[in-house]
Structure formats: C-alpha cells, structure tokens
Image: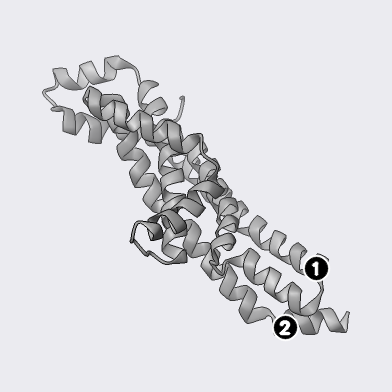
Amino acid sequence: MENLIASLWAARFQIAQGLVTTAEVSAAPIALGTILGLAVGIGLSYGPRPLRLLMHFYVDVVRGTPVLVLVLASFYVLAFLGLHLGAKASGILALTVFCGAHLGEVTRGALAAIPAGQVEAARSLGLGFGRILALVLVPQAVRLALPVWVNTAVEIVKASTLLSVIGVGELLLKTQEVIGRTFLTLEFYLLAGLLYFAINYSIQALGQRAERRLAIPGL
C-alpha cells in the first residue's frame, strides 16, 4: 500500500498533464465539430444540389471510416502531402472531421423534424430565410439534437485515447508510461478509467442540465 501511494504521488504531475491534454484534444474537436456539423446539417437540408451531394459524400465517407484510420490519415497523409501539423493538431483535425460528420447528420434529422407549417407561418410574417433559420429552425434543431450531441461528445472523449498511436501525450499514453516505470498495471489503469468516467459523467450532467433549461413546458 505504501508503494502504491508513493507511486501515485510520484506520478501526479504526469497523470495531470495527460488529463489536461485529454481535455484539450476533446474540447477542441467537440467545439469545432459542433460548428462544422451545424453548417453541414444546414447545407444538407437547404443547400443547392451540388452542395448537398458534396455534404452527403463527406458524411458518408467519414461515418464509414474507423476513427483510428482518420487519425492516422490526418497525421501521415497530410505530412506526405507536405502539410506538417504536428501530432496534437492532426489528432484534433481528425476528431473534428469525425464529430462534424456525425453532428451534420444529426442536425439534418433535427431540421427535418420541425413541422413545415412553422416555416410557412414565419414567411407569412415577412421573415426572410436567414432570419427564419436563425430564429425558428436552428434553436429548435439544437433542442432536438442535444441528447445525441451529448452522446457524440462522450464518444469524442473516448476516441481521444486513439491519439496515443501518433504520440499525443493524452491520459492513456501518460498512464502507460507510468505503468512501464512502476509495473502497477491494474492500479493505474483503474485510475485512468475513473478519470475518464469523471469527464464523461460531467459532460452528461451538463447535457441533462441544458436539456432541462431548454425544455418547453407541455412539449
């Protein structure tokens, strides 16, 4: 027991560094992927046919590709093409592309679920499409898509562990480095699991709180 406590204390900065990196490489793709997904969803729903075909191609290709392949492609293929982003930036790019494709389809489905009569009513009030989109469609689509958005955010946190293959020092990689030095495999993997659970539980709790605040009484 004394050996475990001493090892935990000695590894505190390394584990904390991995935890911070995990937060960085998860939060950035979630934020950027949300913006991208919203734009893709609007393009899929209301864009001209060539744009819709392009968006469909992007969504279908990315959703059909394993996240690990996206991570490796963003790191090695871009470097082969002369674009050297670094491991962390490449990982964030891969997870953003993955998140944007999933949320784009979610946004399209949420926009399709809004009754067409609301758009007609807004037009009868003299609102242009831009204001209808901003004031009527997007707020309702965000409310409808929020539960799936929370699930996608949790998936992004779990997918961030894949960035260890390109050398990003996130929590899993730092944990493995500590295990390699201390040989306390079960103890440190258990600690990493608890930390991942704490992050994902926090996201779910914030999502549920947002759902309650955005809920319309009676609906």
Residue 192 location (% of width, % of height): 69, 64
Relative to residue 35, is residue 191 drawn left or right? Answer: right
Residue 161 location (% of width, % of height): 60, 57
Relative to residue 135, is residue 125 drawn left or right? Answer: left
> Which amino acid type corresponds to the residue marked 2 in the rendered image?
Trp
Q: Nearer the viewer, mark 1 or mark 2?
A: 1
Check disc 2: other Cα within 10 Å, few if <14, some if 14-19, many if 20+: few
Q: Secondary structure at mark 2?
A: helix
**Whole-Å distance between the Cαs marked 1 and 2?**
16 Å
Determine the residue positioned at 33% across, 36% down.
Answer: 40
Residue, disc 2:
9
Judged from this view, the residue extending furthest toward the left is 126
Residue 174 location (% of width, % of height): 64, 71
Label placed on residue 185: 1
Q: Is residue 215 visible?
A: no
Check disc 1: other Cα within 10 Å, few if <14, some if 14-19, many if 20+: some
Determine the residue positioned at 38% across, 35% down.
Answer: 58
Q: Secondary structure at mark 1?
A: helix
Determine the residue positioned at 20% across, 22% down.
Answer: 122
Q: In the image, is residue 123 above or below residue 140?
A: above
